[in-house]
């Protein structure tokens, strides 16, 4: 399977910006996708933000399997990390964020006239592109002025934003130089974290379909009207069985070429798109029981 790579030039600039900005903030909000929190966490941040209090914010919790998300929170607690699942678009869970931040922040004072008074907590929000940073900022600041887009990397510059009695420093999304774990890379691609031009949906289905059949048996059969037998065959053997499955999905959904032949590429695109839009239901693409530690 073709390997996935990234790290466009602006990522190096973002890394430098975060290094320079860390001294300005008290707490870091590290955003990850609740569907795959470990794969979507940038390992470079452990070095870039060493010594800074951090809250792991698991965004898109509304799209993740709630039981698996609870297991991830327990996993991070065991590893000494504070984690908070939330849904920025509906606001569910966001009311817990600022109290958690204040509990993590060291006490700071600022001169007001002749007195020193507690100053507003300063936060920095970091994470890979397309993980929901803008949605969270808009929810916290009660405004729609922050750019939001489905394409990774839409935020380009540092921005200070007032949030209640706190200040929030936004940063562009930052990726790491090399994707060592190609399984995690493919799951990130399936989730929508990687730009579309880097993808091959049929290749991604080679990863996703066996995985989802193992973890959520019956889901694809119910959604696409295919039988479990072909799904079981695909889970054990790719190649022709996968193409046959995509052909069946294509025929079921009317995705055909001129002449009536099923269009397997469009069928694969449909499956991946429905994962990314939540039409397949609440799925977690990574489970803590498989994290290896």
Image (cartoon, rainbow, N blue to C red):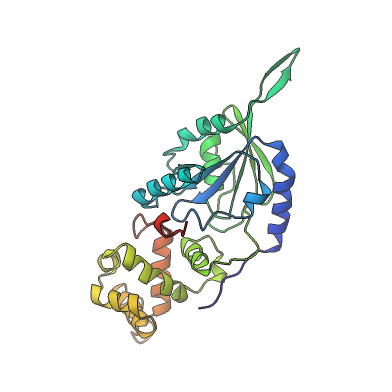
Measured as percent of width and height from the top left, residue 147 is found at 59, 48
Dividing the picture into quadrants, the one containing residue 229 is bottom left
Residue 40 drawn above or below residue 160: below
Q: Residue furthest bottom?
A: 259
- Can residue 132 be seen in this snapshot? no
Q: Residue at x 52, y 50 (%)?
A: 32
* Residue 55 in picture, x, y percent from top left: 54, 41
The answer to whether residue 16 shows anywhere in this view is yes
- Image spot of residue 15 (x, y percent): 70, 53
Residue at 54% of width from left, 77% of height from top? 2
| Relative image position of residue 135 (x, y in whole percent) | 52, 45
Depth order, front residue of 124/164? 124
Q: Quadrant of residue 238?
A: bottom left
In this picture, residue 80 sits left or right of residue 281: right
Number of on-image labels: 0
Looking at the image, residue 264 lies above or below residue 209: below
Residue at 55%, 33% in the rendered image: 101
Compared across the picture, whether 164 is left or right of 229 comes to right
Figure check: 286 above or below 165: below
The answer to whether residue 70 is left or right of residue 84 is: left
Q: Residue at x 57, y 46 (%)?
A: 30
């Amino acid at each position: 399977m073709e390997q996935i790579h990234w790290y466009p030039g602006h990522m190096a600039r973002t890394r430098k910006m975060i290094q320079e900005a860390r001294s300005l903030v008290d707490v870091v909000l590290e955003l990850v996708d609740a569907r795959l929190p470990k794969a979507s966490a940038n390992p470079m941040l452990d070095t870039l933000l060493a010594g800074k209090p951090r809250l792991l914010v698991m965004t898109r919790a509304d799209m993740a399997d709630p039981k698996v998300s609870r297991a991830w929170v327990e996993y991070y607690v065991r590893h000494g990390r504070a984690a908070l699942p939330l849904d920025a678009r509906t606001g569910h869970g966001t009311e817990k964020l600022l109290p958690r931040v204040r509990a993590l922040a060291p006490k700071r004072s600022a001169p007001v006239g002749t007195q020193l008074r507690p100053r507003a907590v300063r936060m920095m929000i970091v994470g890979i592109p397309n993980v929901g940073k803008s949605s969270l900022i808009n929810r916290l600041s009660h405004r729609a002025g922050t750019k939001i887009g489905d394409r990774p990397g839409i935020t380009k510059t540092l921005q200070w934003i007032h949030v209640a009695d706190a200040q929030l420093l936004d940063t562009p999304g930052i990726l790491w130089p090399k994707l060592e774990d190609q399984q995690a890379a493919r799951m990130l691609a399936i989730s929508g974290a990687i730009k579309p031009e880097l993808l091959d949906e049929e290749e991604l289905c080679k990863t996703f379909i066996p995985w989802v059949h193992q973890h959520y048996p019956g889901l694809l059969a119910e959604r696409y009207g295919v039988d479990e037998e072909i799904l079981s065959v695909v889970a054990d053997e790719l190649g022709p069985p996968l193409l046959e499955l995509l052909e069946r999905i294509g025929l079921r959904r009317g995705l055909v070429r001129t002449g009536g032949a099923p269009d397997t590429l469009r069928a694969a695109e449909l499956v991946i798109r429905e994962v990314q839009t939540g039409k397949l239901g609440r799925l977690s693409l990574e489970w803590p029981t498989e994290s290896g530690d």
